[in-house]
Image: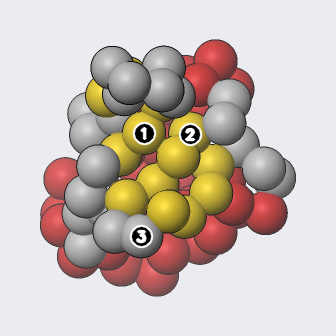
Amino acid sequence: LFRSLSEPAPHQRVFAALLQFVKRDAATGQWRIQQMPKHRQLADQAGVEETVTAEAVATLIQDGIAERDYPGMVINDISQLNKLAG
């Protein structure tokens, strides 16, 4: 199966879905997701498998772009997340 060049890659679709949850914290100025959505919800939104969602989120954390801050997530590099989302 080949995907067209115009179709975003699975991780890219997850990053784009995640961006919909990012808000700027008025008190700290940090970009954050107040309440991290379930992997299932993100997967449904992005049209990917749940494992792809888990991998994409793990990649953001490993690369230091984001860090978990239960129950949410802090986005350390919003411009990089925007680039990854395409």
Q: Residues within 10 Å of mark 1 (few under 14, many from 20)?
A: many
Q: Which residue is mark 2?
A: 75
Q: Which residue is mark 3?
A: 70
Looking at the rendered structure, the kind of residue marked 2 is Ile
Answer yes or no: is residue 32 visible. yes
Labels 1 and 3 touching (C-beta < 8 A): no
- Residue placed farthest to the front in the image? 27
Residue 78: percent from left, percent from top: 59, 25
CA separation, marks 1 and 2? 5 Å
Residue 34 or residue 55, whichever sits in front = 34
Q: Residues within 10 Å of mark 2 (few under 14, many from 20)?
A: many
Q: Which residue is mark 1?
A: 32
Identified at 18% across, 67% down, the residue is: 41
Looking at the rendered structure, the kind of residue marked 1 is Arg
Residue 43: percent from left, percent from top: 28, 65
Residue 52: percent from left, percent from top: 49, 71
Identified at 26% across, 33% down, the residue is: 20
Under circle 1, the secondary element is strand
**Left or right of 23: which side holds 32?**
right
Picture disc at residue 42: none
In the depicted structure, whether residue 2 falls above or below residue 65: below
- Residue placed farthest to the bottom in the image? 51
Give the image quarter of residue 48: bottom left
Residue 4 or residue 52, whichever sits in front = 52
Identified at 78% across, 50% down, the residue is: 64
